[in-house]
């Protein structure tokens, strides 16, 4: 019974983590990886629409540059598996933060 009481609080998080394991399916993933790679190679944020084939002259504000850098860093270290683990970890961490802020019990989290 003591072991069950120690394991039980982690079960909702384990379930969410396992349920969140899937291969990234974002159609723009290659684009984000290229922009992250550019940052790693040049040390600055790319401000031109260099890698777009449809709208090369289009000016835009790169609002996802930090996410692109993190995504490329994780991908270069762990590939698609690393991105999958990062995504599942972020979903699980979000549940943890919401559960702590809402002061949910283990049973509230399960239900």
Image (cartoon, helix red, strand yellow):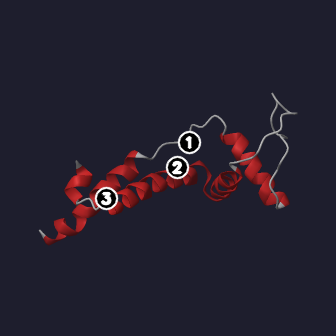
Identify which residue is drawn at 70% across, 45% down: 32
Residue at the far top: name it.
54
Identify which residue is drawn at 22% across, 53% down: 108
Q: Quadrant of the N terminus?
A: bottom left
Q: Pointers 2 and 3 in contact (CB under 8 A)? A: no
Task: Residue 97 in the image: state x and y as whole percent.
Answer: 40, 60
* Residue 19 found in image quarter: top left
Query: What secondary structure is marked by label 2?
Result: helix
Of tags 2 and 3, the one toward the viewer is: 3
Q: CA distance from mark 2 to mark 3?
A: 27 Å
| N-term-proximal mark, 1 vs 3 | 1
Q: Is residue 48 above or below residue 43?
A: above
Residue at the far left: name it.
1
Q: Which residue is mark 3?
A: 102
| N-term-proximal mark, 1 vs 2 | 1
Query: Taking 84 as reference, is 93 left or right?
Result: left
Q: Which residue is mark 2?
A: 84
Q: Residues within 10 Å of mark 1 (few under 14, many from 20)?
A: few
């Amino acid at each position: 019974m003591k072991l069950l009481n120690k394991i039980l609080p982690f079960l909702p998080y384990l379930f969410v983590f396992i349920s969140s394991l899937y291969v990234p399916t974002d159609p723009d993933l290659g684009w984000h990886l290229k922009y992250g790679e550019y940052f790693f190679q040049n040390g600055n944020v790319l401000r031109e629409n260099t890698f777009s084939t449809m709208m090369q002259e289009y000016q835009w504000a790169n609002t996802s540059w930090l996410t692109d850098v993190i995504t490329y860093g994780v991908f270069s270290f762990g590939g698609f598996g690393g991105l999958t683990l990062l995504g599942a970890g972020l979903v699980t961490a979000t549940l943890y933060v919401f559960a702590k802020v809402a002061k949910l019990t283990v049973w509230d989290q399960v239900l």
